[in-house]
Every structure is written in structure tokens, then in C-alpha cells.
Image (tube, grey):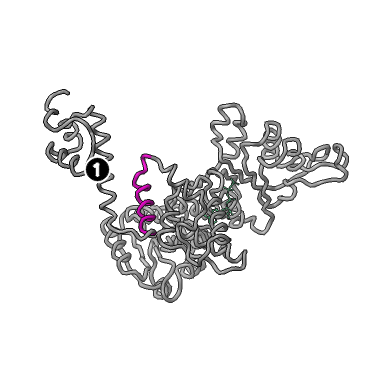
Amino acid sequence: MSRSETVWIVDDDRSIRWVLEKALQQEGMTTQSFDSADGVLSRLSRQRPDVIISDIRMPGASGLELLAQIREHYPRLPVIIMTAHSDLDSAVASYQGGAFEYLPKPFDVDEAVSLIKRANLHAQEQQGLEVPTIQANTPEIIGEAPAMQEVFRAIGRLSHSNITVLINGESGTGKELVAHALHRHSPRAKAPFIALNMAAIPKELMESELFGHEKGAFTGAASLRRGRFEQADGGTLFLDEIGDMPADTQTRLLRVLADGEFYRVGGHTPVKVDVRIIAATHQNLENLVQAGKFREDLFHRLNVIRIHIPRLSDRRADIPALTRHFLNRAAVELAVEPKTLKPETEEYLSNLPWPGNVRQLENTCRWITVMASGREVHIDDLPPELLSHAQENAPASNWEQALRQWTDQALARGQSNLLDIVVPAFERVMIESVLKHTAGRRRDAALLLGWGRNTLTRKIKELGMNVGGSDEEDGDEG
Ligand SMILES: Nc1ncnc2c1ncn2[C@@H]1O[C@H](COP(=O)(O)OP(=O)(O)OP(=O)(O)O)[C@@H](O)[C@H]1O
């Protein structure tokens, strides 16, 4: 490039401006910084940067207001929106407002720089496309954890499209919630969102459920019934647990997706529909295809865009916020004061395995709201299965987690001098295991532990361990 690209940085946080300025200048770009959105617009009438990167929340006009103004007056100018409040609403609002990208803070500086370069290239290639602004308003999906930010980005990116989406994730991770968000942030938002769980419908009823039936199509079909496909016309059909769909229904579904029309059960006139499919499964569809249980051609039709929803144990950072959200919601449902967690209870919950994912956490919050006696929730107030579960199932590889839980509980009991209890226990386990490994030979054991032999002997005495063998005799094999 002959001339240096100019990037405007808009953020009320001086350190962010500074970090970006330095990084961009190092890449040979020219920067100009603004501490609010207000100055940017007046400047734009005289001067034009190649890319703008702006924070959302600032005193005065917000980054999204700035974005809207720029889209209206300078549609070719790419804007990257940054925010410390990495919620779905800001992600979606950014994309729908026509942002080139959405960058949740804290971000990797290199990532920011390469994004800015991409924005610049894109602007040159595209010569600007104007995108309509739609007001965002969703039910809350909580997700500060990086894995969820990826999901939000996907929802944002897809918000202009009607493309088929396949959602993967364990049961209770929020697949339906995400499917709904995809719909609400799509051009079909005003049309129906129809959800259907393949695992919950008896096989023999599935076709009529999906495609409806004509009057008299079979015994009991007293009148014409429109199926889910017709109900979802113009909107979105969410097919949950698609892996459980029987083979013949898969064949019919494939045909509908190809032709955009189908016959009601017992019908002879084709029914035309325009339906966006979002499918979800907790199973590995590739494996089902290999096992001959899922049609490969249908799999490819559904697998256009895939969104993976992480299990709750892979986004533990979100557990406190989710818990507060569910406790507040349960309190509203039950018309009581919301419970709050003691810090050690929050920490304890954050470290549980949560095999039932977000749904299990939600149910736990309902349980707590009903059962916990005080306003503040102690570890002892948790449902008994969570208390025993943690102790029995703490995996050996995860001893730190077990230790953390033990510490929380000891603190909750008011115990002190904790290291006096834990350190000897720790040393005892290490010494026993290593001596077992060396068949009682202390010299080898000391080497493996990384201690001198005298230290090991002293420790064994101090700990009052009865480990057989002695310091004198262990010079030889014996
Ligand atoms: N990130 C989240 N923020 C707030 N609520 C959530 C979130 N994820 C899930 N939930 C809530 O948890 C419950 C379970 O979510 P959902 O039904 O979407 O899961 P699912 O993956 O579709 O489960 P299944 O596969 O068992 O049908 C719902 O009540 C949903 O509102």
C-alpha cells in the first residue's frame, strides 16, 4: 500500500487507546484517538479514516449511536465495536447495526490488529454495503466465558441470514435458547418459531406431527391438521434431537428441504412452505452417519453452519452470573425475596461437575430458593446430592478441586491453622505412594521425591509414619 492506513480509536479508557495506538503504529498505520464518540462525527465531515474502532459505553453518545450515524452517512467506513460488557445484546446490536466486527474485551492486541487490517481490506474490496439497522431485544443468554462469546458472535454474524444451522451440545447446555435467539435475530423474527423434540414424539406420530394430515388419512384423523412445517411457514422450525429422527422421516425431510414442498399424510396436493431449519443434537451425527443411522445427504444439508454450545463445566466463569440470574428468576416465580450465595458457596458451586449443565444449575437454584432457610445460602444449604456428589466423585486427577472444596468447608466450619492439617496429610500421601513404588527403598524414594535421604527419614519420624524398613538398612536392596 502506498499510503499509510488511518485508524481512529474511540474509547474513554486511556490505557486501551494507548495499547492500540502503539500496536497499530508498529504496523505502520496512522492513528488518531478520541475519548468520546461526540468529537468523531464533527471530524468526519472534514476527514475520513480507513477504519474506526470504538468502545460501546462511553460518556455522551455510545459506540452504537456512533455506529448508526456512520452507517447512515458513511456506509463504506468499517467500524469495529469493542465492549467490556460482552453480552449477547451488544454483540447482536453491533452486527445488526452494521459493525464489521465485534470485539469483546479483554482482547488480544494481535487479534485486534489483524481484525483492523481485515476491515480495511474488506472496505477496499466491497466498496461499502449498506446494512439496515434492526433494534435488538432478546431474552437474556448469559455468557461472559470465551466459549460463549464464540456462540454470540455466531448469532450476530448470522443475524442477516436464513441459513440452516446445526447446533451441537450436551443436554441442558442451552441449545433451544440459542436456536430461539438465532430466530429472534433473523429476518424472520416476526414469523413463528416452532420447536419440536424428535426424542419426545412417538415414531408413528412423527410424520403427521411434522407434515400434518388430511381429514380421514388414518383412523382418528377426524379433521385436517396442519403440521409443524405449515405452522412455521415464513419462520423457523427448530428440530431438537434430530439424531433421533426415524429413517423414513429423514427421507421425507430431505425431500422437503430440496423441494420446498411436501404432502400432508394422506394428501395429494403439494403444500409449499418457506421454512428455515435449525436442528440440534447432543449426539455425534458423523458417528450416526457412519453407523448407518443417519442419512449422509441429510447430514450435509443440515450441517451448513455449525454452532457448538460448550458444557457448563467448560465455562465455569459463567456459573456465578448464571446462578444469580436463576436465583432472581426463581424468586420472581415464587414471589419471595431472592437468595444470595455466600462467597464460599459460589466458589463451591463453580467447581462442581454439572453433568446436567445449565438446566441442572437452574433446577438447583429453584431448590435453593424453596429450601434454604436464610437469605444467604451456605454450603450446607445446598441439595444433599450436590454435597455428596462432590466428595465421592472428585476425580483423582482433580485433587486441587477436592482440596479447594475441603478448604471451603473447613472455613465454613470456622476451622483455622488449615495448613497444619493439610500439609502433613499431603506429605504422608506422597511418601506412602513413592515408598510403595520403590518397594520400601528409602534412598530411591528420596530421589523420586526430590528430597535428601535425611530429610525423608526426618519426615517419616515427624509424621509418625509406620512404613517398615529403616534408614540404616536401606543402603542395600533389602
Ligand atoms: N446461557 C444461558 N443463560 C441463561 N439461561 C440459560 C442459558 N443456557 C441455558 N439456559 C436455561 O437453561 C435451561 C435449559 O436450556 P435449553 O432447554 O435451551 O437446553 P437444551 O440444550 O436445549 O437442552 P435439551 O438438549 O435437554 O433439550 C433453559 O431454561 C434455558 O433458559
Along the line of sight, the residue nearer the viewer: 284 or 184: 284
State the image quarter where residue 248 is shown.
top right
Residue 475 position, x and y percent, is 11, 27
Q: Which residue is mark 1?
A: 427
Residue 44 horizontal side relative to residue 236, left or right: left
State the image quarter where residue 347 is shown.
bottom left
Along the line of sight, the residue nearer the viewer: 233 or 292: 292
Q: Going 39% across and 61% down the picture, which residue do you hit? A: 51
| Residue 8 on the magenta segment | no
Residue 452 position, x and y percent, is 13, 38
Q: Secondary structure at mark 1?
A: helix
Residue 115 horizontal side relative to residue 453, left or right: right
Residue 268 horizontal side relative to residue 141, left or right: right
Q: Going 37% across and 48% down the picture, which residue do you hit? A: 401
Residue 186 position, x and y percent, is 60, 55
For ligand 1, tell me if the residue under mark 1 lies within 8 Å.
no
Going by the numbered disc 1, the residue's amino acid type is Glu
Q: From what the image shows, is residue 412 above or below residue 36?
A: above
Magenta range is 396-412
Residue 478 position, x and y percent, is 17, 23
Q: Is residue 83 visible?
A: no
